[in-house]
Amino acid sequence: MSTHTELERLYQRDGFLDGDQVVKAARSAAKWPDLHDYLYVQTTDKQAAHQHRVRMAEDLIRRVKITIETQPERTIRIRKFVAVRNDDGTSAGYQATLDAMRNPATRERVLAQARRDIAALRRKYDTLLELADLIDLMTEAA
């Protein structure tokens, strides 16, 4: 069996999937051996706790907003920090959005990631006809 197959079995059993349900099922090594191995054997509790705290910290970083003036008497709220990727796709951490956009090399990396995100969004939702026009506009603007 595989984690993919076990997720499919769990979906067939319950009619949905969510993280809490998968973690609870994976506790049973006998019924869900691959999920158990992936979630409980390959990672120690200490590693899992650290990874969880890293995700919490990154979520906190993404939630910080600032208000900037884009035109006289027009302001918008944006994220204070933006994720920056290295040329090989690995994380270079977060930088202040305004600083990142002022630096030509960093700006290009941020915009390249935005284009990849739009392409991924297009692939994810391209079957929903109600969103086709919106996705086309985003793709053209990128």
Image (cartoon, rainbow, N blue to C red):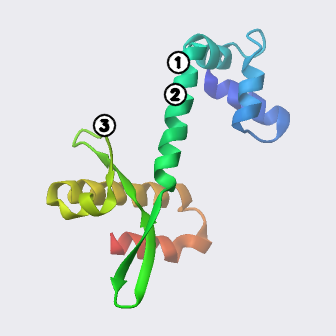
Amino acid type, callout 1? Gln
| SS of the residue under disc 2 | helix
Mark 3 burial class by Cα count in 10 Å: few <14, some 14-19, many 20+:
few
Residue for point 53% across, 55% down: 124
Up-down relation of residue 50 to residue 56 (above or below): above
Q: Name the residue under label 1.
A: 47
* Mark 3 and mark 1: Cα distance apart in space: 20 Å
Q: Mark 3 points at which residue?
A: 90
Mark 3–mark 2 contact, CB under 8 Å? no
Which badge, 3 or 1, comes first in the chain's sequence? 1
Mark 1 burial class by Cα count in 10 Å: few <14, some 14-19, many 20+:
few
Mark 2–mark 1 contact, CB under 8 Å? yes
| SS of the residue under disc 3 | loop
Q: Residue 2's image quarter?
A: top right
Which disc number belongs to residue 51? 2
Residue for point 72% across, 39% down: 18
Amino acid type, callout 2? Gln
| Residue 83 location (% of width, % of height) | 36, 49
* Mark 3 and mark 2: Cα distance apart in space: 17 Å
